[in-house]
Structure formats: C-alpha cells, structure tokens
Amino acid sequence: MQPESPAEQIRTALARIAHLADTGAVDDYVEQFTQQAEWTMPANPDRGLPLQVRRGREEIAAGVRERRAAGIQGPGTFTRHVTTAVAVEVTSDTTARAEAVWTFYVDTVTAPRLSGVGSYADEFELEDGRWRLSRRVIARG
C-alpha cells in the first residue's frame, strides 16, 4: 500500500472533522485544528446563531460546546455534516488550501431532512507530521 498523498490526507482530515462534529469528543475535534486556528461562521438566524469568529483551540472548543448544549449538533442530536465536492491545492510542503461544499441534515433517525447547505474555504498546515486545519471560513447558500 502506498502512503497517501498530501491531498488525500487533507481529504481524510476533512471527513474526520465532519464525523467528529457529529459524533466525536470535543477534544478529538479540536485536535484536527492547529493551535492558532481561526474558525469563522456567518450568522444563522434559523438556528438563532450570531456571526462567530473563534481563534485558537480553546475558543473553537467553546463554540462546539455551546452548539452541543443548544442541541444544534453533536452526539444525540441526530444531525449530520456531509462534505462533498472537495478540491485541494497543495501550495507548499507545509501548506494547502481546500474548497468544499457542505450539507447539514437534521432528524437523521426519524425523518432525515436537509437543513442547510454552503461552502468551506479552508487552509491547512502540516503540524507535527499531520495536516491540520488552520483557517476555516464557512459560507451559507
């Protein structure tokens, strides 16, 4: 078996991030980010969420905990993030960019329904031998 290319490693990281957002531990989720990562999400009036800009793992973890406490995502909420149409550009030995489309489903056990769609504009850095998300800008629509 040949080792995965950087682009494949980044695609795997994107899938892992989606899985962990829905069913994983918060600590495992934030491990996918660099120490100084920035995570930006636009306001979502349908979910009662204001614009969010989180910097660093601690702030990103706090945002995850808030959304989980509100029942918006995470274990037991029966929601799913689906990441598709992933395009990866490796820009150097230690940096890369990725663009992807996301869809968000709710009521996945009883009556699965599409709740949102948008895009991710991501930047990755190779940190400790592993590709980690260093910047994510989320767009709706």
Image: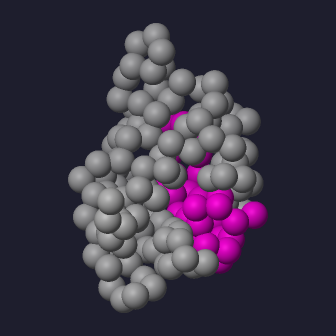
Residue found at the very far bottom of the displayed protein: 92
Residue 135 visible in rendering: no
* Closer to us: 65 or 126: 126
Question: Is 54 placed left or right of 88 in the picture?
Answer: right
Q: Position of residue 102 (x, y in %)?
A: 35, 47
Question: Is 26 placed left or right of 128 in the picture?
Answer: right
Residue 55 sits inside the magenta stretch: yes
Q: Residue at x 40, y 88 (%)?
A: 93
Q: Residue at x 65, y 58 (%)?
A: 30
Residue found at the very far front of the displayed protein: 1
Task: Give above or below for 111 relative to 69.
Answer: above
Residue 38 sits inside the magenta stretch: yes
The residue stretch that appears in magenta:
30-58
Q: Residue at x 46, y 26 (%)?
A: 106
Give the tally of numbered discs: 0
* Closer to us: 132 or 50: 132
Question: Is 119 placed left or right of 108 in the picture?
Answer: left
Q: Position of residue 52 (x, y in %)?
A: 59, 59
Q: Residue at x 32, y 59 (%)?
A: 1
Indicate the quadrant where residue 121 lies.
bottom left
Q: Position of residue 28 (x, y in %)?
A: 66, 52
Q: Position of residue 94 (x, y in %)?
A: 45, 85
